[in-house]
Amino acid sequence: MSSETAGTPPTGSETPPAASFEAPADLVVVADPQDPVAVELAVYVTEQGRSVAVLDVFDAAQLFTVTTRAGTATVDPPVPLVLLLPAPPERRTGFDAEFQLGECFAQLWAVAALTPAPVVNRPAGTLVAGRTTRSAAVTGRRAGEHGNGELFSHAYPRPGDPEGEAFWVEDLGTLRAGRWPERPPGNGPYRARWTDTDPATETVVVLGGRGWRCTTADLDHLGLEGRSVAAATALGLDLAALVWRVTDGTATARLVHAEPFPALEQLRMVWLGLGPPAPGGAVPVIYALGLATDGTLAHFTARAAADVTLVDLGELAAGGAWRLALPDDGDSWLLAGDQRHDLGPGDGYYCRLADLSALEDDLARRVRWRGLTASLTAWLDTVPGAVVNRPGAAGDNGSKPLHEVTLARLGFTVPESLTSSDPGRLRAFAATGPAIVKALSGVRADSRLVAPEEFDAFVPHQGPVHLQRYVAGSDVRVHVCGDAVHAEEAVSTAVDYRTAPPQDVDFRPHELPALLAAHLTARTRELGLAFAGWDFKRDTDGTYWCLEANPMPGYDWYDRRAGGAITASLTDLLTGGTT
């Protein structure tokens, strides 16, 4: 027994301490430096213009500092991690070395679980493998895929009631397997299960929300890509190779193994950026869905510092095609013109959906528009990737009275309003104080002051009309994107500054009170939005009157004056950043 106590750094280790990084690499891969996957990954990342450090367990653990205080943890440096952890040594190398190895594994477990940086694969209940286990049966159940049972035994097992054609036995010491009664090399213990005599298998490599089969066999009817993504998600794995046994000809498939550290041979079958290239050779990161004539969508597509593919819904509705599966089965796509777009559930989607069915005279085209928007709305509301914004979020913006009640209930100061077709009530409201008339629905319209006498000849069938109490002061537009807040003040004598000539409006960056900024980010999330444009009037007393939260803001006008800062935040959000 070593004289060193637990908690005291061991001495005499052959592993030298790691040099501290003054500026950590863009990515740290924890692996044996000679690991083939780590080597290939390092080459690939370097080719993309990023820096990478491949560190063994000791160097990686010694790189990080974890501080805990009052139930919160800080990990320094917060660098993205890929875990390709080697198996523990089969032979004992001495207490001190084993103790230090255990300490390093424990440190990496804490680092990977607590760091705010991206981690592939972030540990769950154990360090190395998400929710996978050495038991294929338990792993299958956790993945939502139930297969044959399993038998564990200290002695060479005998088959029970048949559940397949052949009873295979694995020695857990040597990890060699043989068909009973052929005993595999080793002295046990053993794991055994029934399978087919000559099973056919298909492997699916999963990365994030996408899956790629390793063969071109005619197995589309089994939906293995979608099942693999669902299984990996259930197991808490971002990267995995899932092996399926195809039985009954090709009628069924059962999950037989989930490998959280895929071998290079498996990855090479789908490598090209861990996925086959899209037409043109690039793997799209972000899809912009909307109308090609939409200036905001065109601005985002041009300014985003990422690969953006614009899909024109007008072209799609006119003569395109689509297939959108819920839950996604790995084969969802849009065909606009001669361009097919394979949609990954883990990709980013910037959505400015529009249903132009009301503008179509042809019944068939009206039906296609409605079918297209209904399909996209359902699919985008369920995919796990970044969607800005999900179509089902914050829909009450299309009804101003309901929206104003929502804003007030969220804790904002909101001007009083009246929505009515009663001439007397409308006249009385306008006579009580300055009032503006606004569109009641979500249709874009300018606001203006209204006088009481305008309702003298008003008749109810011209209504309803939405009036809101006018607030004198400057206008403040706030774009909230995740945790990023971009505010601009517009000082103008016009009632609606958007209608004034630009030279008559003084636009200036605006710093919101910290409490209001925090309230806005929290309430934006509460509305189910990732991106919102908030409109305020700021009166002479400094009170912020909330007018609207727009779930699909036309932000390009503001972004040009902000030097592209809003687009940068939006791009970061869509590519999995921390904005």
Image (tube, rainbow, N blue to C red):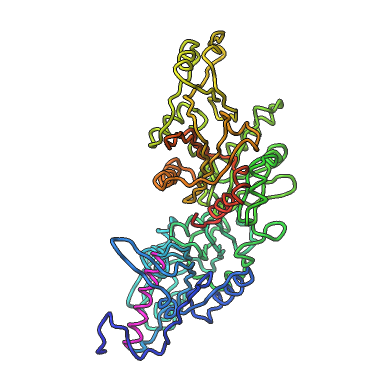
Residue 109 drawn in magenta: yes
Q: Main secondary structure of the magenta part?
A: helix
What x and y, as percent, mark residue 297? 64, 44
Magenta residues, start to end: 95-114
Residue 182 visible in the picture: no
What x and y, as percent, mark residue 80? 49, 67
Q: Nearer the viewer, residue 29 or 445?
A: 445
Q: Which residue occupies 50% across, 22% down?
A: 435
Q: Which residue occupies 61% across, 51% down?
A: 564
Q: Nearer the viewer, residue 275 or 476?
A: 476
Q: Is residue 399 above or below residue 98?
A: above
Whether residue 395 sits left or right of residue 115 in the image: it is right
Residue 273 visible in the picture: yes
How many labels, in total?
Answer: 0
Residue 348 drawn in magenta: no
Q: Which residue occupies 71% across, 25% down?
A: 361
Image quadrant in which you'd find residue 346: bottom right
